[in-house]
């Protein structure tokens, strides 16, 4: 089953599950309880902490939920804040597993982005941690495929708006031609 966030990020071939950590967790849990899919493919956009360029395509099975305050030593968490999907058959030859950070907030400070990179976290997407968490709970293999729309800097939102349509087109073409998941 292919899922996406929804609202602005919709695809005719994907089921929208909601924006952010909470909506996506609630709606994906509901979906898993009613009609558990054999696998999940989450598709969407991402902000780059600097290593990936705008319009790059990234695949991942690893998600984190690390807030900026963690890097400043201002918080801690009792949860497992980096999780990985198990059971997804990764057969794509160029697959490099990238850690995708999720938060209900978008990073707009490029200096903070460097802290994420230092911890091998390379992109952010608001929903992926919830998606991987729910998938693990229901033992559903999951993978994410993301198109980079912006860097995590002061222009993040404006660049997202400016680049979204082209990123969506690139992502759809990747799903068709590279992964052969859609027609």
Image (tube, rainbow, N blue to C red):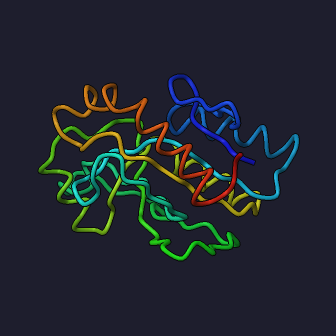
How far from the left and from the top, in percent, is residue 104? 41, 36
Is residue 92 or residue 42 the one in the foreground? 92
Is residue 178 or residue 105 the one in the foreground? 178
Taking the view exactly as shown, the residue that stands out farthest to the right is 35
Residue 116 located left or right of residue 13: left
How far from the left and from the top, in percent, is residue 134? 67, 52
- Image quarter of the C terminus: top right
What residue is shown at x 43% (from left), y 45% (from top)?
A: 125
Taking the view exactly as shown, the residue that stands out farthest to the top is 7
27, above or below 114, in the image: above
What residue is shown at x 28% (from left), y 40% (from top)?
A: 150
26, above or below 76, in the image: above
What residue is shown at x 76% (from left), y 63% (from top)?
A: 139
What residue is shown at x 42% (from left), y 56% (from top)?
A: 100
How far from the left and from the top, in percent, is residue 140? 75, 60
Residue 168 located left or right of residue 138: left
């Amino acid at each position: 089953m292919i899922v996406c966030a929804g609202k602005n990020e919709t695809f005719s071939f994907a089921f929208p599950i909601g924006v952010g950590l909470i909506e996506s967790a609630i709606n994906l849990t509901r979906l898993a309880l009613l009609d558990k899919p054999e696998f999940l493919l989450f598709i969407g956009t991402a902000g780059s902490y600097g290593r990936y360029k705008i319009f790059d395509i990234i695949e991942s099975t690893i998600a984190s939920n690390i807030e900026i305050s963690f890097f400043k030593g201002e918080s801690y968490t009792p949860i497992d804040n980096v999780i990985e999907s198990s059971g997804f058959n990764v057969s794509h030859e160029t697959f490099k597993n990238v850690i995708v950070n999720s938060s209900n907030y978008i990073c707009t400070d490029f200096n903070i982005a460097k802290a994420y990179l230092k911890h091998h976290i390379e992109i952010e997407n608001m929903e992926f941690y919830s998606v991987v968490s729910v998938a693990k709970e229901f033992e559903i293999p999951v993978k994410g495929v993301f198109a980079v729309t912006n860097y995590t800097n002061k222009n993040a939102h404006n660049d997202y708006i400016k680049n979204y349509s082209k990123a969506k087109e690139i992502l759809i073409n990747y799903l068709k031609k590279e992964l052969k998941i859609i027609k």
